[in-house]
């Protein structure tokens, strides 16, 4: 792979006062890059200023930026990119944090710009943590190492290296950056991790509440049993640590028959991917 660019870059963070904008800015501020922080909401501007950073208007920050990070909600990326993309210099990198808008074709395009999406994987449940800070950092970007999955819409190796150098610092500490296509990244997020994994996590929480409030099991006992067995379930299924017992396999089959629809794997076809992204971006809302 082509080496990362030498010397500092000029970076504009759009939405610098939002949740992800603050997270990436907290890391970028520690680099040698010239970073400009842009925020339009009053609450967001106050957060940026309270963090000791100066707020810059986008009209000033964007024209000479090497990288423009659009740290705004997916549903805002269409109008935001329409406003900002015409102002960018040729060769600049437009970096978004989620693939939905890019996959749906909502970003304003220019042939002389590079478009990159980079989404953090968050620290693995199997990560070997050694410090209190690493244990406390469940989201990533502070102390616990994480991987990142990214996509670039061109085959420009130099631009890919430039983008990766920024991605590694804004999501730091980063173990590895995995490069895929925009469509593949969309199948990872939302399909794999939101449609499936986050839904399962929420289902576990619902099951915990039912165990406590409907069955009457003391919450401390139910929570201890669930958290420990969740670790075992993930280790057994995703790492192959230990086989499940025969009785457990029977209970698992009952769970599938009772809870899971037989055609659930349809979420991995393009039509269903388009459906969930349209819902996320409110593409079919009337008015």
Image (tube, rainbow, N blue to C red):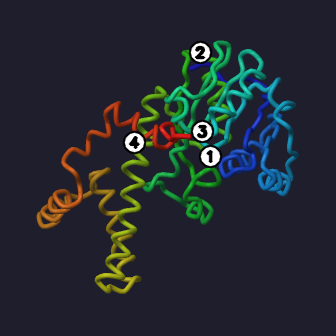
Q: Are marks 1 and 2 in contact (CB under 8 Å)?
A: no
Residue at 51 percent across and 52 percent down: it is 123
267 on left or right of 280: left
Upstream in the sequence, badge 3 or badge 4?
Answer: 3
* Badge 2 or badge 3: first in the primary sequence: 3
Q: Nearer the viewer, mark 2 or mark 4?
A: 4
Mark 4 and mark 1: Cα distance apart in space:
25 Å
Which is in the foreground here, disc 4 or disc 1?
Answer: 4
The quadrant in which the C terminus is found is top right
Q: What element carries label 2?
A: loop
Above or below — where is 160 with respect to 236?
A: above
Kindly identify which residue carries mark 3: 97
Q: Is residue 21 above or below residue 115?
A: below
Whole-angstrom CA distance, mark 2 to mark 4, is 28 Å
Mark before the other along the chain sequence, 3 or 1: 3
Who is closer to the viewer here, 162 or 45?
Answer: 45
Name the residue nearer the viewer: 120 or 18: 18
The residue carrying mark 1 is 173
Q: Residue at x 80, y 29 (%)?
A: 62
Residue corresponding to mark 2: 156
- What is the distance, in whole Å, between disc 2 and disc 3 at their CAs? 19 Å
């Amino acid at each position: 792979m082509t080496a990362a660019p030498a010397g500092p870059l000029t970076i504009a963070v759009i939405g610098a006062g939002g949740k992800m904008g603050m997270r990436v800015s907290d890391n970028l501020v520690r680099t040698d890059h010239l970073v400009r922080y842009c925020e339009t909401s009053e609450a967001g501007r106050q957060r940026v200023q309270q963090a000791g950073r100066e707020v810059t208007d986008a009209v000033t920050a964007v024209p000479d930026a090497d990288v423009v990070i659009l740290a705004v909600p997916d549903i805002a990326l269409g109008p935001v990119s329409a406003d900002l993309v015409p102002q960018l210099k040729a060769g600049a990198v437009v970096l978004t944090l989620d693939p939905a808008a890019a996959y749906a074709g909502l970003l304003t395009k220019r042939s002389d710009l590079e478009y990159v999406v980079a989404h953090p994987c968050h620290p693995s449940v199997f990560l070997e943590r050694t410090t209190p800070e690493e244990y406390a950092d469940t989201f990533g970007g502070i102390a616990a190492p994480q991987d990142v999955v990214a996509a670039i819409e061109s085959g420009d190796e130099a631009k890919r290296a430039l983008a990766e150098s920024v991605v590694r610092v804004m999501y730091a500490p980063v173990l590895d950056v995995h490069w895929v296509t925009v469509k593949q990244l969309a199948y990872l997020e939302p399909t794999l991790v939101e449609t499936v994994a986050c839904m399962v996590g929420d289902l576990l929480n619902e099951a915990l509440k039912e165990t406590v409030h409907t069955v009457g099991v003391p919450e401390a006992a139910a929570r201890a049993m669930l958290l420990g067995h969740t670790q075992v379930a993930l280790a057994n299924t995703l790492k192959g640590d230990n086989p499940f017992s025969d009785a457990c396999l029977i209970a698992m089959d009952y769970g599938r028959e009772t809870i899971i629809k037989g055609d659930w794997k349809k979420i991995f076809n393009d039509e269903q991917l388009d459906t969930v992204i349209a819902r996320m971006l409110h593409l079919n809302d009337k008015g």
